[in-house]
Amino acid sequence: MDFALSGDQRAIQDAALAFALAELAPHSARWDQDKHFPVDTMRQAAALGFAGIYVKEDVGGSGLGRLDAALIFEALSYGDVATAAFLSIHNMCAWMIDSFGAEALRQAFLPRLTSMELIASYCLTEPGSGSDAAALRTRAARDGDDYVLNGSKAFISGAGVSDLYVVMARTGAEGPKGISAILVEKGTPGLSFGALERKMGWNSQPTAVVNFDNVRVPASHRLGDEGQGFGLAMKGLDGGRVNIASCSLGGARLAFDTAKAHLQTRQQFGKPLSAFQALQFKLADMATELDAARLMTYRAAAALDAGDPLATQYCAMAKRFATDAGFEAANQALQLHGGYGYLRDYPLERIVRDLRVHQILEGTNEIMRVIIARELLRP
């Protein structure tokens, strides 16, 4: 067991961090305030290979592994959590097409997705089915060589801007085995979008309802076989959970570093805050929790790369622990700044707002416990 990163992995990590510091961090506060979706900057990230990290190289992907992706998303989130998190979603969609799409679909979409000429969104959640995702109601009725979609999806990142939507829709009976995954292109008649949601965080990416009103798409746009969609969605979410755990680590690391610097420079009662043992203990606990979360996240990523049968359990564990630990570290960092932490002049309040949703999306942390218990009790 070797905990050291390889030379290639360190180079990947360094490249992602350099990009984050140069192209994301200087603009993060403005993007949040202006609710600006930085498409041009994400295309710069795509030029470095960050839009198809674990997509095959024949269609423009980087051909890297899940541990490489975890390193990249952690580093990018040090610059801007919300933008890195959207890149994670885009990567998940691209991987699903690469892994389960017919060759014609791969060639039609992936070269433009890996460059982010096209942007992709993932559509599973509905107004009436969140944690109970298999109860979704959006229906795709077969009509000759097409599917006709009716229904709606909620909380969709990129809605209205993205060019391609990976949609989970019911093509058969009730339950998970009646669900298929279908690609819907922006501009298809009957596809529309709700008003932008007013959110606590993740303000640099648009979020809205996606509506389907007799949206007709070719049956050739289906990923995998009919009825496999829910399983494909869950496989996508295993990787998505590692990625969002990594995004929590990156944001929390920035909060930690900011708090550490503050404790070393801020003077109270005639000495720096770092001289007070109570505050030293807070910093020590934050560092310990984040290191534990990082190890769990890297193990989950390595398990996905290895095809470990326990990968789903490890991914749920990492997502649950890292998103909780990341939010708590950011919240503690804000507290250590006192009133300054509450001001937008400092990054802490933004990090807290951005990291909070990580405990909800990609499966709530309560659902992570359900998954972990199910895997532990499996015969």
Image: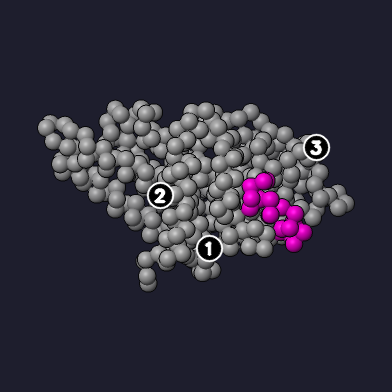
Q: Which residue is mark 1?
A: 65
Left-right relation of 154 to 216: left
CA gap, disc 2 and disc 3: 41 Å
Q: Where 345 sits versus 279, above or below? A: above
**Residue occupying image coordinates x 86% and y 49%:** 143
> Residue at left 76%, top 38%?
187
Say which element carries label 1: loop
Any magenta on residue 106? yes
| Mark 2 or 3, nearer chain start | 3
Q: Quadrant of the N terminus?
A: bottom left
For disc 3, the marked residue is 189
Task: Report crowding for label 3: few under 14, some 14 to 19, many 20 or more residues within 10 A (C-alpha).
Answer: few
Mark 2 Cα within 10 Å, few/some/many (few <14, many 20+)?
Answer: many
Measure the alpha-carbon separation of dots 2 and 1. 18 Å
Q: Residue furthest right?
A: 144
| Disc nearest the viewer among 1 and 3 | 1
Mark yes or no: residue 369 visible.
no
Q: Residue at x 71, y 52 (%)?
A: 109
Q: What mark, if any, has residue 249 been given in the picture?
A: 2
Query: Mark 1: few, some, or many residues within 10 Å (few <14, many ≥20)?
Result: some
Q: Which mark is residue 54?
A: none
Three-letter amino acid code of the residue under disc 1 = Gly
- Whether residue 249 sits left or right of residue 60 in the image: it is left
**Would you say residue 332 sits in the magenta stretch?**
no
Marks 2 and 1 in Cβ contact (< 8 Å): no
What residue lies at 46% left-to-right and 45% top-to-bottom? 20
Q: Who comes first in sequence, dot 1 or dot 3? A: 1
Instruction: Give the residues drawn in magenta, as a range.
Output: 101-118
